Amino acid sequence: MNTAVGRPKTATNRLIFLDVLRGLMLVGITLGHFGDTFVWLVWQPLGYFSNAEGFILLSGTVFGLVYARLYARDPDQLNKKAIRRAGTIYLNHIGLLVFVAGFTWLTFGWSAQWHSHALYLDVAPIQGFLLGILMLYQPPLLDILPMYALFVLIGPLIIRQLVQGRWLLVLAVSLGVWLVFAHLLFHGLWRETLAMNAGLAFPYQTGEFDPFVWQLLFFSGLILGHRMFAHPTSIRPHGFWIGVSMSIAVYLFTLRHGYLPFPSFWQPTWAERHDLGVIRLINIAALAYLFWSLVDFTRGVVWSRGMCMVRDFFATLGRHSLPVFTAHVVLIYLTIPIQQNGGVELRYLTGIGLIVLLYVMARAFDWRANHKKRLKANLVAG
């Protein structure tokens, strides 16, 4: 989503930074999904924090920043644009579902590796496909976009609450929903319990990401994005919180990588990814604060040409995060045999090649967008 046109320079710089981070998350997600080849590099390198959490948090932040400005300019367009955006996300999901279903059915019997990503489409093809359309069945890698579409639909309601100054209420409700669905309702297994009671036993898949749990990340990011637009001075970093965040991040980093022993009272569920355990949330908050402090302190830095090229590489990916994410799913499925049976060199070259291919695709989207702008400008000038 390229929304930099007509935006104040400070907001544009923030969006570039957010796009860079989203691009980094997308690279990590792509390499992380490429079998086990790049796990050592991209799986929670900074602590109890994965690329998926970062992507959802950043997407919420971008939504809050862009749609808060849209509301200030034209409130009547808020719902219309959000519905269009959610519809685009849903169509991407349907496109992926059609691809995965066709891929699964066409390769059935070739090799177990070919179709292991979508077992339910083998067991119950019609039911699996229909439930996939309804976003109730989610094969691996097809569970982020439906959740994202739902968040975008709810987004305008949240924006209006934030405009009324009710950000604490929004955060409290979001925390309450997270608590109920992650820990209180069937001990966080409410979707699995519902599926089993409906007779949809294994290999029925409810997806890795529970939208009622992961909404906390998106709407926390949305609150941050709104405040970046409406109250930019209120989110300037403070030395005390930087110190606290750094201490938390370093300590949890050492625990995650085994440099320090776990305390005797430690419970593994506190860092659980599926339910966003409380330690994981604290780790995410600390890292988010440190990253935001970093961008605030480097606002006046003049970047070298090489660093600008690196920045623009990731920003291009992040700017077109939806088609890049969609394309990465297709590429991951198509390269399953290499992930499973390829040699080390081939797997590394293929993984890097996927990133290059995604970047070329994103650049093509940039070229098309710029071409449309030039045509529009020529029409206006003529």
Image (cartoon, rainbow, N blue to C red):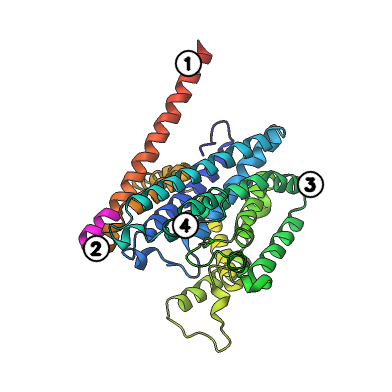
Seen in the picture, residue 258 relative to 142 is either above or below; the reply is: below
Q: Which residue is mark 2?
A: 341
Residue plotted at (48% across, 63% down): 50
* Secondary structure found at label 2: helix
Q: How far apart are the two marked residues, 3 and 2, measured between alpha carbons?
A: 56 Å
Q: Which residue is mark 4?
A: 124
Mark 1: amino acid? Asn
Q: How far apart are the two marked residues, 4 and 3, measured between alpha carbons?
A: 48 Å
Q: Earlier in the sequence, mark 3 or mark 2?
A: 3
Q: How far apart are the two marked residues, 4 and 2, measured between alpha carbons?
A: 28 Å
Q: Earlier in the sequence, mark 3 or mark 1?
A: 3
Mark 2: few/some/many CA within 10 Å (<14, 14-19, 20+):
few
Q: Which residue is mark 1?
A: 378
Q: Which residue is mark 3?
A: 164
Seen in the picture, residue 190 relative to 265 is either above or below; the reply is: above
User: Which of labels 4 and 2 is toward the front?
Assistant: 4
* Secondary structure found at label 4: loop
User: Which of labels 4 and 1 is toward the front?
Assistant: 4
